[in-house]
Image (tube, rainbow, N blue to C red):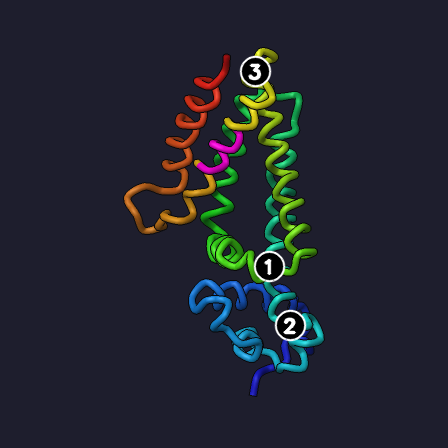
Amino acid sequence: MARNLGLEVGVDVAEQIRVEAARLFHQRGYGMTAIREIAEAAGISSSTMYHHYRNKQDVLFAISRQFMIDFNDALLPVLNDSTRPPRDRLDDAIGLHLKISSERHTELLSIRGNRGALSPVQLDTIVGLQATYQRAIRDVVAAIQGPKATRGDVAITTLALMDLINGVCQWFEPSGRLSIDEIADHYRHLARSLVIGAAP
């Protein structure tokens, strides 16, 4: 019988559910994971599970939403710090983006592979959080490229930059030849070439 973690002091049951669900969604796939299996992995009963989340879709939404809130809380202060040069802000943001992506890759990949399972309202919420981050990146790109850059130029460069750094989590292996810090250094150089090279 599963331990009822909800009765144990200091245990964040909702967080434990999200952690185990992300792992199962990543390993087995969203469609192949039953709500009962998530409860068992989290060490709780099914009744405790339903006390926190109504269904599997709500669990996926909670994983996605919490990840993006944490992500934005970490990145937006860096990107929006107008006291620092925009190139420095972009450099730091790229490093932090890749660090978070590597440390929480299980959550990130479980989210990316299952966006279609979210309801339209849930998806709009996640897209809105992502758009907030992308706007902050775009503003930094615009500041680097200067007033001669058109809105279209900045938008295309921003999308290309996002594709560049978002793709790392798909292939990065912690046991690989390069550490995430070394990869971040390389990607900073790529980003500078992309952003500065695209400036008019």
**Secondary structure at numbered mark 3:** loop
Q: Residue 97 magenta-drawn?
A: no
Give the residue at mark 3.
Answer: 149
Magenta segment main secondary structure: helix
In percent of width and height, residue 30 lies at: 50, 67
Residue 194, numbered label: none
Q: Residues within 10 Å of mark 2 (few under 14, many from 20)?
A: few
Of mark 3 and mark 1, the one earlier in the sequence is: 1
Please report the bounds of the magenta region as a residue range.
Answer: 158-163
Q: Are marks 3 and 2 in contact (CB under 8 Å)?
A: no
**Rendered image quadrant of residue 58:** bottom right
Residue at the extreme bottom of the image, as rendered: 1
The residue beneath circle 2 is: 55
Tell me residue 95's x, y (percent).
48, 36
Query: Amino acid type of disc 1?
Result: Ile
* Badge 2 amino acid: Asn
**Rendered residue at 67%/78% (across/down):** 48
Q: CA distance from mark 3 to mark 1?
A: 37 Å
At x 41%, y 43%, the residue is: 168
Mark 3 vs mark 2, CA separation in Å: 47 Å
Which residue is nearer to you in this view: 135 or 63? 135
Image marks 1 and 2: residues in contact by CB distance under 8 Å = no
Q: Which residue is mark 1?
A: 63
Q: Is residue 156 rendered to the left or right of residue 9? A: left
x%, y% of residue 152? 57, 23
